Amino acid sequence: MKKKTKKKKQQQAFWFKLLLTILLILIVFLVWVAGEQKPVSRVSQTLASDSALNTGTEPNIAQIIEPLLDDTYVLTFEDELPDPVFKGSTEQTATHPAENRHVLSLVIDDIGYDLHALERLIALPYTITVSILPDAPHAKEAAMMAHQHGIQVMLHMPMQTANPKYQQKMEKFYLHQDMDKQTFTTVFEQALAKVPYVEGVNNHMGSQLTSNPKAMLWLMELCKKHGLFFIDSRTSSTSIAAETAQKAGILWNTRDVFLDHSVAPDALQHAWDSMLSCVKRKDSCIMLAHPHKETLNFLEKHAQGLSSQAFVSISKTLKQD
């Protein structure tokens, strides 16, 4: 009887030790897992939310550029926007050609990453202009698609930003103020060669370079050499790009409204209303936008508000002097 009792106690002790060992292993595992988890950034949360809604047929340009961004810089390539609605010029300025009055030019920047987005833009019931990044993976194909559908093509030329977060992330086609004239020329012409059918140029970023007199003089000389007009995207309130283009004697103009500085529904609607006001106030108005999913949805739903005849290609809004 004593032997049976002793054996029973030994079995109980064995199972107790085994259970205790398993419990300790489980605790160590849970602690290790908790230590390995990393905080999810706001950008990642935004993209995860977008992915949940995405059917897989519509690439989101934010996902393409996300590795270049941080949590303070979401869904826009522009580096400084002191005035998403530019009110620096309210006078009735003559346009080229002279018969155009109260018209809108809608320019879509950052084209060349998402061809499905370009297809949606081409299908819009009004005239648009596209501006293509030279280092985008589908730059040439996008330019050819746009040209085949009668859409005017521009070069969205990357330029040096004043924002220190992005100065170290500039790709090979960025123009910057430390270049000598030969290098500046070579970089510009290499970028130009990447995008066929280009008729004009506007700046991608550029809050620092567009404030540099020497660089802007070189840029406008190159535009004149290649028969190109220039549109100042106005990513900085200190930009002298439009002023320099005017002095250089090339066709030019300046952005009036950014449609999607924010892609929040209220912000998009406010920018759209500002554009309608701009068109009533001025002979011509230039609005820049980007191929974000939210922007495309908004443009498809807001084809009304202006007649299709009010939308013109960018060349119809250029100034002669």
Image (cartoon, rainbow, N blue to C red):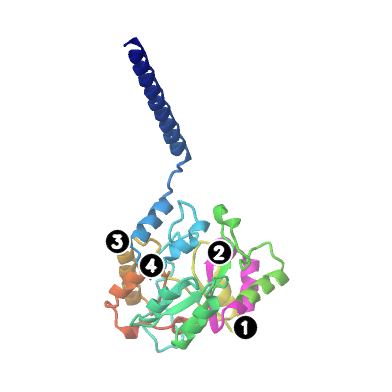
- Which residue was labeled with disc 2? 206
Residue 273 found in image quarter: bottom left
Q: Residues within 10 Å of mark 1 (few under 14, many from 20)?
A: some
Q: Determine contact: label 2, label 3, CB under 8 Å.
A: no
Q: Amino acid under label 1?
A: His
Relative height, residue 195 to residue 162 (above, below): below
Q: CA distance from mark 2 to mark 3?
A: 27 Å
Is residue 77 in view from this perspective?
no
Q: CA distance from mark 4 to mark 1?
A: 41 Å
Determine whether the residue tagged by mark 4 lies in a helix, strand or loop: loop
Determine whether the residue tagged by mark 3 lies in a helix, strand or loop: helix
Residue 18: percent from the left, percent from the top? 41, 26
Q: In the picture, which quadrant includes the N terminus? A: top left
- Which residue was labeled with disc 3? 266
Label drawn at residue 100: none
Please report the bounds of the magenta region as a residue range.
193-222
Residue at 57% across, 67% down: 158
Residue at 47% across, 36% down: 32
Residue 103: percent from the left, percent from the top? 37, 81
Residue at 31% across, 75% down: 300
Q: CA distance from mark 4 to mark 2?
A: 33 Å
Residue 80: percent from the left, percent from the top? 49, 59
Q: Count up the numbered dots.
A: 4
Of the numbered discs 3 and 1, the one sitting upstream in the chain is 1
Q: Determine contact: label 4, label 3, CB under 8 Å.
A: no
Q: Determine contact: label 4, label 2, CB under 8 Å.
A: no
Q: Is residue 210 magenta?
A: yes
Q: Amino acid under label 2?
A: Gly
Determine whether the residue tagged by mark 2 lies in a helix, strand or loop: loop
- Which residue was labeled with disc 1? 226
Front of the two marks 4 and 1: 4
- Which residue was labeled with disc 4? 56
